[in-house]
Image: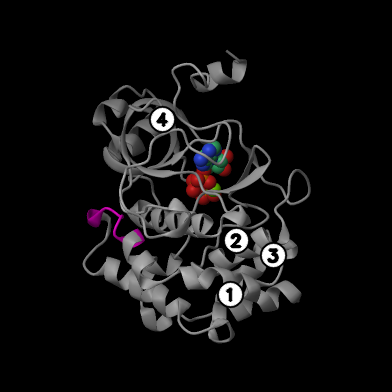
Amino acid sequence: MSEWLKETGCKPVGSAYAGSNPAPPTSRRPRPAGPSSFPGGYAPRVLRTVRATRYVSPLREGGSVPALVEADDDGLYVVKLAGAAQGTKALVAELVVGELARALGAAEPDLGLLVPELVLVDLPIELSHAEPDPEIQDPLAASAGRNVGLDFLPRALPYTPASGSQPDADLAAAIVWLDAFVENVDRTPRNPNLLTWHDRLWLIDHGAGMYRQHAGLDPAKARGRFAAIRDHVLLPRASSIAAADERLAPHVDEALLRRIVGRVPTDWLDGDAAELMVTDLLARRAGDAASRTFVEEAERARVA
Ligand SMILES: Nc1ncnc2c1ncn2[C@@H]1O[C@H](COP(=O)(O)OP(=O)(O)OP(=O)(O)O)[C@@H](O)[C@H]1O
Ligand SMILES: [Mg+2]
């Protein structure tokens, strides 16, 4: 076992560990059976739930200090904690934006739009009792119950615009389009929230998407400006955002949005928040490329 594996507590791939697949993009874990009307085999009706069995370490690179945990399926997951300061709205964004990206990736497989599998993670309160560091124990205790997990990509490297493998122009444009659509402020050169794993780019950390939900979503404001898109880390590498829109927008219909939002645990959505989210995203996506503010704004920033 390598020193790195000992440090993280990971089990070596090929022995008992049946978690993250070292040969992307296929996953070894069986997916829940069920009909999917979406191209590419994306079946967004059921999110798997796993139960955390061991707290491995904090991921201190993240502002919210996500937890690396081992679960009852022997997989390792990065857990965005419901009890972290960012609150459950960040978890809602993580799920909705992450699942939307996964759906688009499945619908347009040639793009190579990749997001680690998202799961719900049940954290038993006992895990916090076993943790001596109060800085970790407190958020763990506050997160007993349901949380969001991402399949852990072992030895993934942070993406840097200046070196390492780079996305092609159409993939970069698709990621800019997605982030402009969901108003994700967190894909900047300072904090790209992209990982390189087996020479491919993986999108992580969508908790800052749909930031308007923090003030209460108002679909009347859905077509407002999103100036932060000019700071997107992939904008300088992107091909036409209008062309990305033509390719991706037709996949984002009401049925897909309802299925995705329907997977968010209802206790994270107050009142009519689920309906508002669908209505808001539909309003943002309404019309054609020429009439969508976010497309025009991202394209203008790209050619500036
Ligand atoms: N699926 C994953 N596989 C491997 N490493 C990951 C994964 N998800 C997150 N990480 C690592 O953990 C760090 C923190 O995760 P993430 O960015 O999701 O947390 P955050 O608290 O929301 O961060 P931020 O400071 O950007 O708000 C990432 O920068 C990355 O190094
Ligand atoms: Mg991050």
Residue matched to label 4: 69
Q: What residue type is labelled 3?
A: Leu
* Callout 3 touching callout 4 (CB < 8 Å): no
**Vertical placement of 81 versus 3: above or below?**
below
Which residue position holds label 2?
Answer: 175
Task: Measure how far apart labels 1 and 3 are at the Cα level.
Answer: 18 Å
The nearer-to-camera label among 2 and 1 is 1
Real-space CA distance between mark 2 and mark 3, rounded to the nearest whole angstrom: 9 Å
Within 10 angstroms of label 4, few (less than 14), some, or many (20 or more) residues? many
- Say which mark, if any, is on residue 235: 3
User: Where is 119 relative to 277, above or below?
Assistant: above
Cα distance in 3D space between marks 4 and 2 = 28 Å
> Residue 180 at what x, y percent from top left?
56, 69
* Amino acid residing under circle 4: Val
Are the residues flagged by discs 4 and 2 in contact, CB closer than 8 Å? no
Disc 1 crowd rating (10 Å Cα; few below 14, some 14-19, many 20+) is few
Q: Do the residues labelled 2 and 1 touch (CB within 8 Å)?
A: no
Q: Which image quadrant is residue 132 in?
A: top left
| Residue 182 is a magenta residue | no
Q: Residue 33: x percent and y percent?
A: 31, 44
Earlier residue among tags 4 and 2? 4
**Residue at image mark 1:** 246
Indicate left or right for 114 with 264 as reference: right
The secondary element bearing badge 2 is classed as helix
- Whichever of callouts 2 and 1 sits on the residue coming sooner in the sequence is 2
**Does 91 appear above or below 195?**
below
* For the residues bearing labels 1 and 3, Cβ distance under 8 angstroms: no
Q: Residue at x 62, y 52 (%)?
A: 192
Mark 2: which amino acid? Answer: Ile
**Closer mark to the observer between disc 2 and disc 3:** 2
For label 2, the crowd category at 10 Å Cα-Cα, with few meaning under 14, some 14 to 19 and many 20 or more, is many
